Amino acid sequence: MAKVMPGRYTAKVEGSYVVFIIGMRINRLLAVHKWVPVVRAMGKMMGELYQHPELGFLGSRTSVGLRTITQIQYWRSFEHLENYARAPLHLKAWKAFNQAVGSDGSVGLYHESYLVEAGHYECVYVNMPVFGLGEVGELIPAAGKWGSARQRLAKG
């Protein structure tokens, strides 16, 4: 279990960055042969991204629900994210998905991209383990000039 950090913290990230939400939904639970390869392919890509920080990937957080797996990823820039979309491992996984699943409805995929300009974000973590932007940025106490959401946004 992750160590809880008592108190209030916020995170500072230098410059602009991208929040990329990507996930899958298992539409047919019994179609294991369709969705397990998707999960495995994502695991391989995550391994590659963590091994090669020069690709611009900063980190991620995964959540698993009954039918969905969602990752919130942080990227240095949209260009880095777009370049990875054209990388060999991603293209191989995308081709395999389209051949195995295509539009048969057994597995759904989704993503959303948010371009965050420097200083146009704020966050707070109270009695939490290191989490979210705190994992990819600098974690600092949310006190004094960093105490409120408005103050954190003004400090950007």
Image (tube, helix red, strand yellow):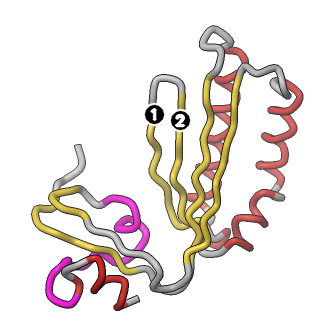
Quadrant the C terminus occupies: bottom left
According to the picture, the residue beneath numbered tag 2 turns out to be 69
Residue 41, visible in the rendered structure: yes
In the rendered view, would you say 139 is above or below 41? below
Q: Which residues are magenta?
A: 131-145
Residue visible at 66% across and 49% down in the picture: 111
Q: Quadrant of residue 149?
A: bottom left
In screen coordinates, is 59 left or right of 113? left
x and y percent of residue 154 in the render? 35, 90
**Residues packed near mark 1 inside 10 Å, few (<14), some (14 to 19) or many (20 plus):** few
Q: Nearer the viewer, residue 29 or 130?
A: 29
Identity, as a three-letter code, of the amino acid under mark 2: Ile
**Residues packed near mark 2 inside 10 Å, few (<14), some (14 to 19) or many (20 plus):** some
Q: Which mark is residue 118?
A: none
Q: Earlier in the sequence, mark 1 or mark 2?
A: 1
In screen coordinates, is 120 left or right of 141? right
x and y percent of residue 107 in the render? 70, 25
In the rendered view, would you say 40 is above or below 90? above
Between the C-alphas of marks 1 and 2, the distance is 5 Å
Identity, as a three-letter code, of the amino acid under mark 1: Val
Labelled pair 1, 2 in contact (Cβ < 8 Å): yes
According to the picture, the residue beneath numbered tag 1 turns out to be 64
Q: Nearer the viewer, residue 46 or 115?
A: 115
x and y percent of residue 4 in the render? 17, 55
Residue visible at 69% across and 37% down in the picture: 109
Q: Is residue 11 magenta?
A: no
x and y percent of residue 134 in the render? 35, 68
- Secondary structure beneath dot 1 equals strand
Residue visible at 22% across and 79% down in the picture: 148
- Secondary structure beneath dot 2 equals strand
